[in-house]
Image (cartoon, rainbow, N blue to C red):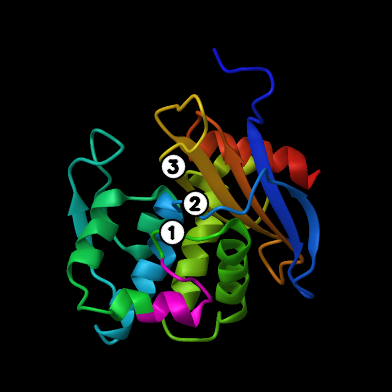
Amino acid sequence: MIPAALVLLSFLRMDVRTGRVLERQWQDDRPIHPGSLAKPFIALAYAQSHQFRFPEITCTRCWLPRGHGRTGLRDAIAQSCNTYFDTLRAALGPGELDAVARRFGLRSVDEARPEELLRAYIELSRRAAEPGVNVILEGMRLAAKSGTAKRLAHDALAKTGTAPCTHIPKSPGDGFVVVLYPAVQPRVALLARLHGRPGSHAAAEAARLLQ
C-alpha cells in the first residue's frame, strides 16, 4: 500500500504569456526523467538533419501490444508510439539531440527539472511558425482529442508520458502529462505527475486541475 503521507499528484502551473509560476505542488526541484515527454524534441532533432521531412514507420509492437501500424509523426505524437521515436533517435548523429535540448532551455532531454521542462514546452508552442514544429503541435492537439491524453476532455495541446518512479516506495512507473490550454493561443501551461499510474491517468487529473 502507498503511505497516506505520500503525495500521489504533483503539478506545476504557469502563465504562458508571462512565464510566471501560478501554482506549484511539487515536493522538490530534483531533475526528473521526462520519458515520452522528450519525444517532440527528438522529432525536431531528427527534422533538422533530414530536411524537415518525417518518415512513416510501421509499428508492430509497442506499449500497445498490437502496435500502431503505419504511422507518421502527427499520429506518433498523439499515440506516443515508442517504435516511431526509437527509430528517429537511432538516426541522429552525435550532439544533434543535445543541441536541440539546449535551444529549448533543457540540459538534456533525458533529465530535466520540472520547471525547465514546462518552459521548454511553452517555447515549443511559441515557435509554431518554425519548420517542423506545427506538425508536432498538431499531434499534441490530436493527443488531447483522441490520443493518449483524451481523458483531458479539453481542446488543448497535450503530451503524455510514463517514466521511472522516484518515490519511496517505488511503483513500476509514474505518469506525466504536459498541457497547454487552450489549444489556440494557450494561456496556461500545466505539468502533472501521478504516482503509480500511466500518463493517460495523469491527463484525467490535469482535466480536474483545469476546471
Which amino acid, mark 1?
Answer: Glu
Residue 29: name its quadrant: bottom right
Residue 107 is inside the magenta segment: yes
Q: Earlier in the sequence, mark 1 or mark 3?
A: 1
Q: Residue at x 59, y 66 (%)?
A: 116
The local secondary structure at tag 3 comes to: strand
Which amino acid, mark 3?
Answer: Thr
Highlighted magenta segment, given as a residue range: 99-108
Q: Residue at x 66, y 31 (%)?
A: 7
Q: Position of residue 90 (x, y in %)?
A: 18, 65
Q: Earlier in the sequence, mark 2 or mark 3?
A: 2
The one nearer the camera, 113 or 117, is 113
Q: Which residue is mark 2?
A: 32
Tag 1 near tag 2, CB within 8 Å = yes
Residue at mark 2 to residue at mark 3: CA–CA distance: 11 Å
Which amino acid, mark 2?
Answer: Ile
Q: Position of residue 200 (x, y in %)?
A: 52, 38
| Side of 16 where 32 appears, left or right | left
The one nearer the camera, 130 or 21, is 21
- Residue 35's label in the rendered image is none
